[in-house]
Amino acid sequence: MSSYYERQIRLDPMDGTPTVQTEDDLAAERRIKTLLEERWDCECRPFGNYCPLDWFAIRNERMIGVVEMKHRSHPHDAYPTVFLNVRKWVALRLASVGLGVPDIYVVEFSDGEVRWVRVGLVDASRVEVSGCLRKVKAYNDIEPVIHVPLDQMQPL
């Protein structure tokens, strides 16, 4: 797996839009998706490319949640918190309130631990401007993030 800083911008084969999503990213999403579907008896489907929301979960053809999935390159006990970008928090909260479904943040760590939390229960006042030490994708790689305490997240 290449580090975040080694990512190369590539063009989306469908429309030529620049992206840095790698095969490793896609494999991590597939692992998390499969685990969620098994544990929560649901089906996870992606929103469209470049939508601020990644996934929605359905059961019996009814939407039961909106989901943000992340993979971290460190073990679960390396830091007391994980970051949730404010822009993702906003999108998840708006979708949750507007659609009347739970907003879920799921994180897989390098040691295989997977944890989740209802975004509506996260203290969004724990904001810090943080991000990449150098430009990888865009100048907004440094942005407001919310610290989500690991002990607030449930093991999956």
Image: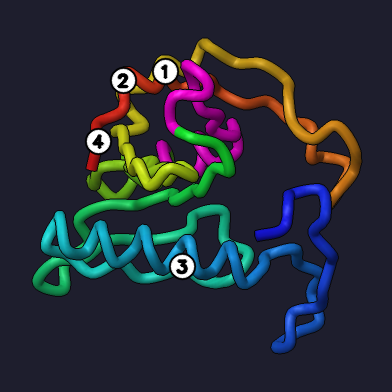
Image coords of residue 112 (percent x, y):
38, 47
Find out whether the residues at labels 1 and 2 contact each other: C-beta distance under 8 Å.
yes
Q: What are the residue bounds of the magenta stretch?
A: 76-93
Marks 1/2: CA–CA distance: 5 Å
* Residue 12 within the segment the image draws in magenta: no
**Earlier residue among tags 3 and 1:** 3
Residue at 31% across, 38% down: 116
Marks 4/1: CA–CA distance: 13 Å
Q: Which residue is mark 2?
A: 152
Marks 3/2: CA–CA distance: 27 Å
Q: Relative to 34, is 110 above or below?
A: above
Mark 2 falls on what kind of element? helix
Amino acid type, residue under disc 3 in the picture = Phe
Q: Relative to 138, is 59 above or below?
A: below
Q: Quadrant of residue 146?
A: top right
Image coords of residue 145 (percent x, y):
62, 26
**Earlier residue among tags 4 and 1:** 1
Q: Which residue is mark 3?
A: 47
Count of numbered circles on the image: 4
Mark 4 falls on what kind of element? strand
Find out whether the residues at labels 4 and 3 contact each other: C-beta distance under 8 Å.
no
Q: Nearer the viewer, mark 3 or mark 2?
A: 2
Q: Which residue is mark 1?
A: 149
Image coords of residue 101 (percent x, y):
24, 47
* Quadrant (top left/top right/bottom left/bottom right) for the N terminus: bottom right
Q: Nearer the viewer, mark 3 or mark 1?
A: 1
Marks 2/4: CA–CA distance: 10 Å
Q: Is residue 73 left or right of residue 41?
A: right
Q: Is residue 42 left or right of residue 118?
A: left
